[in-house]
Amino acid sequence: MSTATRKPGGARLAAFALLVIPLMTYLFLYLAPLGSTIALSVENGQLGESLVEFRAADHQDREAQTRALLNDMHKMDSGKQATAARELNQELSGFRSLFLNTARKSTEIDPSTEGLIAFDKRWTDDKYWNTLEANASALTTRHYQQVMGLVVDGDGNIAAKGDDIYLQIMLRTLVIAAQVTALTLLIGYPLAYAIANAPPRFAALVLVMVLMSFWISILVRTTAWVVLLQTNGLLNSFLIAAGIISQPLQLIFNRFGAVISMTHVLLPFAVIPMMNVMRTIPKSQTDASQSLGAGPVESFLRVYFPQTLRGVFVGGGTVFILALGFYITPALTGGPGDQMVAFYIADFIKRSLNWGMASALSTILLTMVLIIAGLIGAIRWLSSARKGRIA
């Protein structure tokens, strides 16, 4: 009786075949969009594709630049002309009409500086030529410069231009995310403790109440907070009826409304990791510490709480990272000064069609998340290494 021998190479081939589908899915659904976003943030769009001859022309020779510009305009169709004009207008207000009018009459204009100026005297202003020169390359850093509040002068030196609105938005996003994380942990820790240590029926009830957030749409929950917190909403009506206040409070369309509603939406992401860690802590440890003379408070602070920090870090880090990219909830419950970076990314895509700025903001937000995740990982590693040395 013969026995078949299994070939190691066949097992490796089968394992590789099983990994191909999830690997390709990962590349297609995750890495490809990320790469596309990063590429869009440095691509110069229609300007980089269309101003080919102008880019190659001698920038010290205005006559050569004029001929090259008119040739590039002539080669563009109406759609490309409109797109290029819009991109230039994003850099210099008023350039759209000048570029479009010139492009549409490019075949009729004498290909010389005098002919171009005769068509429109605005071409005597160096600011239009400087804008063209700064935005004619195929790749550009202008979107990142705008986000960081920087400008490149004629000599190629980088300087602050004083317009740091997007840096302020980034800081505001970090502050709101930190506020939501702190409030979520303060509310979530007692809930997680109750689920892990309360009698089974009560713990199950609390867990179901927490998980209700996963079963209801974010939009529905956010709208519920708008109804609850508005001027004539349930909370203000209750406070007035109870005689606590005489005039309705402004609880919505401000920082308070945005933080409260985001905390409610993200609460389960903090509770579940902490609950899972708390369930692994033997109750006998607390009993042993109390039998040795420690009171309930001391036993909690010195024995129980330190062992739950792993869940606190995981839950807090998850909430913080998710809060950084929130859009719907702060857009509906926050005021104009409480909108986060995701709001402006959506605005660039939907209203101004500025994919470059949207991609640059998205890339910087992704970089912030990676840095924060790296810091959290480093803190946990240092904490584990310290415990190992002590042991």
Image (tube, helix red, strand yellow):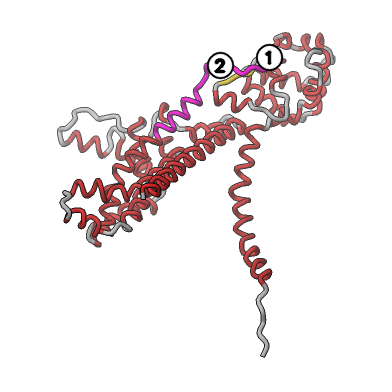
Residue 221 position, x and y percent, is: 37, 45
Task: Judge left or right: residue 286 versus residue 365.
Answer: left
Is residue 307 placed above or below 136 in the rendered structure? below
Disc 1 crowd, CA 10 A, few/some/many (<14, 14-19, 20+): few
Is residue 233 placed above or below 387 in the rendered structure? above
Q: At x 79% / y 27%, what residue is drawn?
A: 52
Residue ID for mark 1: 155
Q: At x 42% / y 46%, what residue is drawn?
A: 385
Q: At x 17% / y 50%, what residue is drawn?
A: 294
Q: At x 54% / y 36%, what residue is drawn?
A: 367
Residue 122 position, x and y percent, is: 70, 10
The answer, for residue 220, to whether it is visible in the render is no
Mark 2: amino acid: Lys
- Seen from the viewer's position, the closer of residues 258 and 97 is 258
What span is in magenta?
155-176
Residue ID for mark 2: 161
Give the alpha-carbon distance from disc 2 to disc 1, as whole Å: 15 Å
Residue 197 position, x and y percent, is: 25, 57
Q: Are marks 2 and 1 in contact (CB under 8 Å)?
A: no
